């Protein structure tokens, strides 16, 4: 469309915020490609090794918000060895040179050192948001540097990160007499915090709307915080329990009743079950409730609470809720859109938790569900078929059955037909994680019907290479394929050569692929990085079984920071 003046194209693109839509717009013609690059303010990099930081800044010279992901998702399950890589330093260095006006930086599963945080703090005077999700390598000293130098910081989020505790001083380093903080999350932090510093920080942060505390924050401090944070809409509590201060709990009851804007609640950690009445004061306003860190709460406690949460849209809870509790969810939470049930007991043999009965109940009552993670002790095809019928809007469905290879609890059959019903009925399904005894038939269903599927995670499933081949040939929108402990070998791996360049990544661990098969893939597809991860020295024999394989598309070529246990073919 060369007849559009540049100013008009720029104005049009100003209304487009979606990364995908802007990617599509950049493909219209050379003019749109150039203008889109010059006007994009927010950039998302799904793999830190997919492109060099310098190339990103050359393409988007005016970016103000950068999101970068590092390690594969299986790092969350300790399947990626320590020292694998994903350092944030090259990205921070490149940003400091090319983009001093950066305002937002979000990193996920990356190694962030104190030196990196120091560089960041002194390079970006206008930094407004720093989000470090599941990151590692830094300490409270680095946080103190950020708090001291980033005087316009509105958001500091350390969700799930591993932070070395070197003292309580960092909270006192935020600007005085007032801060710009709107969101602060240090729930992951081990070690005590300074009560006085925390109370003072909240008091001088008049715009604070989201606050998530670690378990070390005592009840008395929480009560004082709530009285000075009237605008809070999202609260993550510390460990709420009886203390030596006799007035702590009554003060907390009184303070939380004044939080009329609060609509999201999490935390409670290992709090005793008798504190659940605290939640009752604000139940009617809650749209988000996360009790996945509260193992002391039992079915009867959860039922009493959830019965009053009639506006709930997001619920995260342990399987202590039981089928009886899920029936209350079904009857009370008609607006529910997301449900996550986590296992409370690491011993699968001792876990009773929830079953297919609770799943059916929720699907029958909560017809607006679009995202579900369900950890259970048993499942049936009939239940999955019912879910598919009742909740056809689901875009993300993840089922985890405690025992690997579990069959239909009633018929003893594989769960192929149940998951087949899910992919047939849920036309908008984008993420699927399967569990239980599954044959190649379920992969045939996925390849035939899951047209919009982007992420597929499977473990202990399939009979032969055909299963994986069905998926690679059928799922045209597939971006991430994660496979563990499946009988897929070299034939299946090499059958996807026509798909991998259009995908973000492929992960295979404990499968039947060999080093020779991986070498063949690397030779056939030079645009991919084919990484073999092995901590055992088994030589370079082509017949050697590969422990872990990570394949991803890249414009940067092989990375230069691979440790000794990673071979890039």
Image (spheres, helix red, strand yellow):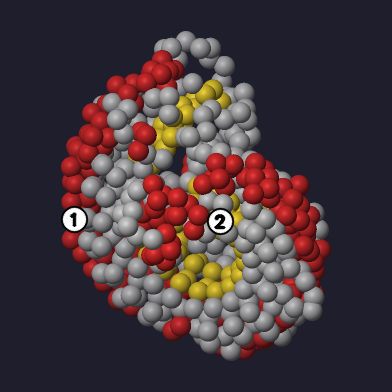
Q: Can residue 372 be seen in this view?
A: no
Q: Position of residue 98 (x, y in %)?
A: 64, 49
Residue 150: which disc? none
Residue 425: which disc? 1
Which quadrant would residue 142 be assigned to in this image?
Answer: bottom right
Q: Quadrant location of the N terminus?
A: bottom left
Residue 63: which disc? 2
Q: Where is residue 56 in the image (x, y as percent from the top left)?
A: 54, 45
Q: Where is residue 269 in the image (x, y as percent from the top left)?
A: 59, 64
User: Callout 1 environment at 10 Å: few (<14), some (14 to 19), or many (20+)?
Assistant: many
In this rendered view, identify the residue nearer to me: 200 or 552: 552
- The answer to whether 159 is drawn above or below residue 434 in the figure is below
Left or right side of 288 for 96: right
Mark 1 lies on a secondary structure that is: helix
- The answer to whether 205 is drawn above or below residue 482 in the figure is below
Mark 2 lies on a secondary structure that is: loop
What separation in Å lies between label 1 and label 2 (alpha carbons)?
40 Å
Left or right side of 92 for 361: left
Q: Is residue 333 visible?
A: yes
Which quadrant would residue 148 be assigned to in this image?
Answer: bottom right
In this rendered view, identify the residue nearer to me: 540 or 258: 540
Left or right side of 509 for 155: right
Residue at horizontal 27 percent and vertical 35 percent from the top: 472
Which quadrant would residue 508 be assigned to in this image?
Answer: top left
Residue at horizontal 74 percent and vertical 68 percent from the top: 151
Residue at horizontal 39 percent and vertical 47 percent from the top: 30
Q: Position of residue 114 (x, y in %)?
A: 75, 49
Residue at horizontal 19 percent and vertical 38 percent from the top: 444
């Amino acid at each position: 469309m060369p007849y559009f003046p540049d100013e008009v194209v720029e104005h049009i693109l100003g209304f487009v915020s979606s990364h995908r839509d802007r990617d599509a717009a950049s493909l219209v013609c050379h003019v749109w490609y150039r203008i889109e690059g010059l006007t994009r303010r927010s950039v998302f990099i799904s793999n830190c090794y997919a492109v060099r930081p310098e190339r990103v800044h050359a393409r988007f010279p005016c970016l103000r918000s950068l999101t970068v992901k590092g390690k594969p998702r299986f790092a969350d399950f300790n399947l990626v060895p320590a020292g694998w890589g994903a350092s944030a330093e090259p990205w921070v260095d490149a940003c400091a040179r090319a983009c001093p006006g950066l305002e937002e930086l979000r990193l996920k599963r990356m190694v962030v050192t104190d030196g990196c945080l120091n560089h960041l703090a002194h390079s970006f005077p206008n930094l407004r948001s720093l989000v470090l999700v599941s990151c590692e390598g830094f300490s409270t000293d680095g946080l103190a540097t950020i708090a001291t130098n980033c005087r316009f910081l509105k958001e500091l989020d350390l969700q799930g990160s591993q932070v070395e505790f070197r003292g309580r001083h960092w909270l006192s380093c935020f600007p005085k007499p007032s801060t710009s903080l709107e969101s602060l999350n240090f729930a992951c932090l081990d070690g005590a915090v300074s009560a006085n510093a925390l109370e003072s920080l909240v008091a001088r942060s008049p715009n604070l709307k989201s606050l998530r505390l670690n378990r070390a924050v005592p009840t008395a401090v929480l009560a004082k915080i709530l009285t000075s944070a009237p605008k809070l809409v999202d609260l993550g509590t510390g460990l709420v329990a009886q203390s030596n201060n006799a007035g702590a709990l009554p003060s907390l009851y009184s303070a939380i009743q004044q939080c009329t804007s609060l609509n999201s609640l999490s935390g409670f950690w290992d709090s005793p079950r008798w504190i659940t009445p605290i939640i009752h004061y604000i139940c009617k306003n809650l749209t988000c409730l996360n009790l996945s860190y509260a193992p002391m709460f039992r079915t009867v406690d959860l039922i009493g609470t959830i019965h009053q949460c009639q506006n709930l849209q997001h619920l995260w809870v342990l399987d202590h809720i039981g089928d009886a509790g899920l029936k209350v969810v079904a009857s009370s939470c008609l607006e529910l859109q997301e449900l996550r049930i986590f296992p409370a007991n690491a011993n699968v043999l001792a876990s009773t938790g929830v079953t297919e009965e609770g799943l059916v109940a929720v699907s029958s009552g909560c017809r607006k569900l679009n995202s579900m993670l369900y950890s259970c002790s048993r499942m049936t095809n009939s239940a999955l078929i019912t879910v598919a019928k009742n909740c056809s809007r689901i875009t993300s469905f993840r089922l985890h059955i405690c025992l690997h290879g579990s069959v239909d609890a009633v018929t003893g059959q594989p769960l192929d037909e149940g998951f087949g019903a899910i992919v047939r009925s849920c036309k908008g399904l984008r993420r699927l994680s399967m569990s239980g005894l599954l044959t190649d038939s379920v992969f045939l269903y996925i390849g035939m019907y899951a047209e919009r599927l982007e992420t597929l995670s499977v473990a202990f499933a399939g009979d032969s290479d055909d299963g994986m081949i069905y998926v690679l040939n059928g799922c045209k929108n597939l971006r991430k394929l994660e496979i563990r402990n499946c009988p897929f070998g070299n034939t299946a791996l090499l059958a996807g050569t026509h798909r991998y360049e259009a995908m973000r990544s492929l992960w295979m661990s404990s499968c039947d692929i060999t080093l020779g098969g991986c070498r063949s893939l690397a030779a056939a597809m030079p645009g991919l990085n084919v990484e073999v991860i092995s901590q055992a020295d088994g030589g370079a024999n082509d017949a050697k079984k590969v422990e872990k394989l990570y394949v991803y598309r890249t414009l940067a070529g092989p990375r230069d920071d691979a440790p000794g246990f990673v071979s890039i073919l």
